[in-house]
Image: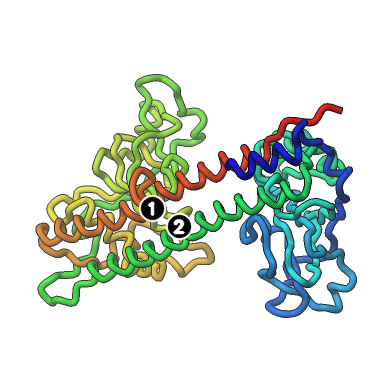
Amino acid sequence: MSKFDDLLLEQCPHGVPFKPLGDVGEFIRGNGLQKSDLTDAGHPAIHYGQIHTFYGTWADRTKSFTDPLKAVRLRRAKTGDLVIATTSEDDDAVAKATAWLGDEEAAVSGDAYIYRHRLDPRYVAYFFQTEQFHSQKRRGITGTKVRRISGDALAKVRIPVPPLSVQHEIVKMLDAFAELEAELEAELEARRRQYSHYRDTLLTFSDAGVPRIPLGELATIVRGASPRPIQAFLTSAENGLPWIKIGDVPAGDKFITKTAQYVTSEGAQKSRRVRPGDFVMSNSMSFGRPYISKIEGCIHDGWLSISDFADSFVPDFLYHLLRSKSVQSELARRASNGTVQNLNADIVKAVAVPVPPLAEQERIVEILDKFEALVNSLTDGLPAELQARRQQYEYYRDKLLTFEEVEA
């Protein structure tokens, strides 16, 4: 960063002025664009919800479009404007922004602001990602369940305003970090597809010598149970039993190792107990996702438990088998009769699964565990590298956008 340090010393020897966003630009509220107005062709359009789910730091093409005749009546972002989502249920996501760099103007929905300014657009978009910005914007967030921020509140947020040459250099360095991260994400996604392919290939047994047997004949499968009202049975006492919930399992993890809450012994008697080595499977949220419990605990009626399978399955083989495309597709097919997909014990019991010899199961597990560590582990493989790269990016982003303020 010596080149950048030299530039900073040359351009800003006494510090950098900090100015309210309202002094270097204006906030224009979007209007009138509904989800029902979005089309696959027409005039470029950005709905505020897409800023949360689709757009990154900047964009030069829109995901959606709208009728050109309607777009004429809407407020539109020009090249270089920021488009800011002003509502969310999560404070961190309030005021998520993307810089619009497309050649055409883009119509913008309500619950979003257009920020028209005199700065480098990507510099401003990167600033909106910093803790420096978040710590200021939190003061202006209002609302209860739906959290929102106004243009007036955003206008009060102070941004460091170095010369444009410095802004451009910061953007250049942060874009390089973002490109490296995108390359890792693309490689990780490719490896995950490769892993899924090999898993499904290894778990497809065309040999007539491998029997297919309903899972209910090979294991005990029962639904969890909830003592009600649950709040009356929660405890912080040392003799409480872990109360297992979906949120206790880290995203993409395989094992349940701890819980945030515990139930009393009376509550445990009204619930369903699982023991180390038992499987639990979600029957609604994260539909059909299996986990292996490493602890003794209780499960509510949003879970199924699978146990007593040791004579037929190596545990890790059963885990890979339950996650395979063939089993997941069969679960979804059997559970799709209602308006909302829900599993029950009878559905899972009825799914016929291959039962190869235990030695063959061990061989398959050895192969798949290596693949899974590569694509899912946060301590090894690509996910760990990607996490480290993101931390490095966030560190340098905040460092590059932190300046000594020039004395008035």
Work out which quarter of the rendered image holds the N terminus and state it: top right
Which residue is painted at 38% across and 45% down in the image? 378
Taking 140 as reference, is 385 left or right?
Answer: left
Report the residue marked by disc 1. Answer: 382
Query: Where residue 203 appears, x then y in whole percent?
Result: 24, 67
Q: Residue at x 71, y 79 (%)?
A: 41
Q: Secondary structure at mark 2?
A: helix
Q: Residue 150, relative to residue 346: is it above or below?
A: above
Q: Nearer the viewer, residue 119 or 196?
A: 119
Question: Do residues under tags 1 and 2 come within 8 Å of each other at their CB atoms?
Answer: yes
Q: Which residue is mark 2?
A: 184
- Say which quadrant the C terminus sits in: top right
Eyeballing the image, is 329 above or below 85?
Answer: below
The kind of residue on which mark 1 rests is Leu
For residue 155, side relative to residue 232 (left or right): right
Position in image of residue 28 (x %, y %): 87, 55
**Mark 2: which amino acid?**
Leu
Q: Which mark is residue 269?
A: none
Give residue 173's position: percent from left, percent from top. 60, 50
Front-lying residue, 242 or 163 = 163
Total marks placed: 2
61 to 309, vertically: above or below = below
